[in-house]
Image (spheres, rainbow, N blue to C red):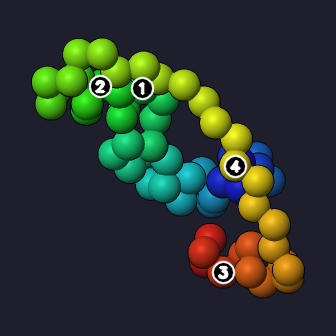
Amino acid sequence: MFWDTAAMLDPEAVVRRAKVCARPMASPGDLERAWKAAGLPNVVQDMITIRMDFALFEDFWAPIE
């Protein structure tokens, strides 16, 4: 979400977004395909939501930097 927003606001961020979002296992279905390729035929893809609370904005921002 961060890089999508940055790319909309700054054309130079488009290049960085492409690099970050083109990593292996970053696209929908990548992990499912990998498990199936490894011989696990009964893989079920689903979605989960994980809540992350941060005491400070810096705690949120540090991993992005």
Picture layout, residue 34 above or below residue 65: above
Alpha carbons under labels 4 and 2: distance apart: 23 Å
**14, 52: nearer the viewer:** 52
Identified by mark 4, the residue type is Ile
Mark 3 residue crowding within 10 angstroms, few (<14) / some (14–19) / many (20+): few
Give the residue pinned by disc 4: 50
At a point 49% along the width and 47% down the height, the residue shown is 21
Identified by mark 2, the residue type is Arg
Which of the two marks, 4 or 2, is nearer to us in this view? Answer: 4
Alpha carbons under labels 1 and 2: distance apart: 6 Å
Direction front: furthest residue:
42
Asked if the residue under mark 2 is in contact with the one under mark 1, i.e. CB atoms within 8 Å, the reply is yes
Residue 15 at what x, y percent from top left? 52, 55
Which of the two marks, 4 or 3, is nearer to us in this view? Answer: 4
> Along the polypeptide, which appears first: circle 3 or circle 2?
2
Q: Which mark is on residue 29?
A: 1
Identified by mark 3, the residue type is Ala
> Along the polypeptide, which appears first: circle 4 or circle 2?
2
Give the residue pinned by disc 3: 62
In the structure shown, which secondary structural element does the residue marked by tag 1 occupy? loop
Asked if the residue under mark 1 is in contact with the one under mark 4, i.e. CB atoms within 8 Å, the reply is no
Residue 58 at what x, y percent from top left? 78, 83
Alpha carbons under labels 4 and 3: distance apart: 19 Å
At a point 42% along the width and 26% down the height, the residue shown is 29
At a point 85% along the width and 82% down the height, the residue shown is 56
- Residue 37 falls left or right of residue 53: left
At a point 45% along the width and 54% down the height, the residue shown is 19
Residue 34 at what x, y percent from top left? 25, 32
**Residue 32 occupies which quadrant of the picture?**
top left
Q: Could you tell me if residue 12 is visible in this image?
A: yes
**33, 11: nearer the viewer:** 33
Alpha carbons under labels 3 and 1: distance apart: 28 Å
